[in-house]
Amino acid sequence: MTDPAVLHDDILAAARTALAAVRARHGDDLRAMALYSDDDAMTVCEAFDTHSHLAASRDDDPDELDYRTFSPAEWAMEGNSPAAAMFDDLSRRAAAGLDETDRESWTTGLFETCVRVLEALRADAGDLLLLFTVTDGGHRDEPAWMRRTSPAHAARFETYLARHA
């Protein structure tokens, strides 16, 4: 089995490329960046959202504001950043690295690697919400990950999770 930590530098490079390109295009309207994976840790994907997209979503359904704030599937850009090909390659490598005999170790390692990438981006990201999530129903560690990647948003995120538990 490949150690998922070996993907760290490549995930970081893809994330930095994507963040720089999306920030150049959207400037101060950019509000959030996510890395996410499926519950089998066979993918590494990116998503971005803007203040204007969130505002339009709020107008459509004000009761779902927190859901739209913290759910990359609802964001303006998902898997289509200028670094999409890099993330596609990372997903192929993640799937190839999975060893069925040690799935839990692989999954834990890839998720931790993605969180560390977001921590490394914190200085470059300014006040952006940085989020790592698991697409297939969430993950028990998401509150702890949020405290590490976006401490300013952690309390609201935990309140949101508690309301929707």
Image: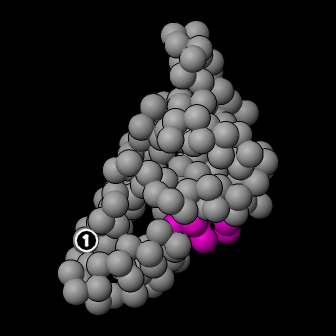
Query: In front: 105, or 86?
Result: 105
State whether residue 126 is above or below residue 121.
above
Number of numbered tags placed on the structure image: 1
SS for callout 1: helix
Query: In front: 107, or 18?
Result: 107
Is residue 25 found left or right of 125 in the rendered image? Answer: left
- Give the residue number, with chain letter if any, for mark 1: 95
The local crowd at label 1, few if under 14, some if 14 to 19, many if 20 or more residues have their Cα within 10 Å, is some
Q: Residue at x 60, y 71 (%)?
A: 116
How far across and how far down the image is residue 100, in percent? 21, 81
Q: Residue at x 58, y 35 (%)?
A: 163
How far across and how far down the image is residue 73, in percent? 42, 37
Query: In front: 7, or 114?
Result: 114
Magenta segment includes 132: no
> Is there any visible trace of residue 91 in the rendered image?
no
Quadrant, the N terminus: bottom left
Magenta segment includes 120: yes
What span is in magenta?
A: 114-121
Residue 155, quarter of picture: top right
Is residue 134 found left or right of 41 in the rendered image? Answer: right
Is residue 92 found left or right of 17 in the rendered image? Answer: left
Query: In front: 101, or 20?
Result: 101
Tell me the amino acid under the disc marked 1: Ala
State whether residue 38 is above or below residue 67.
below
Q: Residue at x 60, y 30 (%)?
A: 66
How far across and how far down the image is residue 154, in percent? 71, 49
Is residue 30 found left or right of 74 in the rendered image? Answer: right
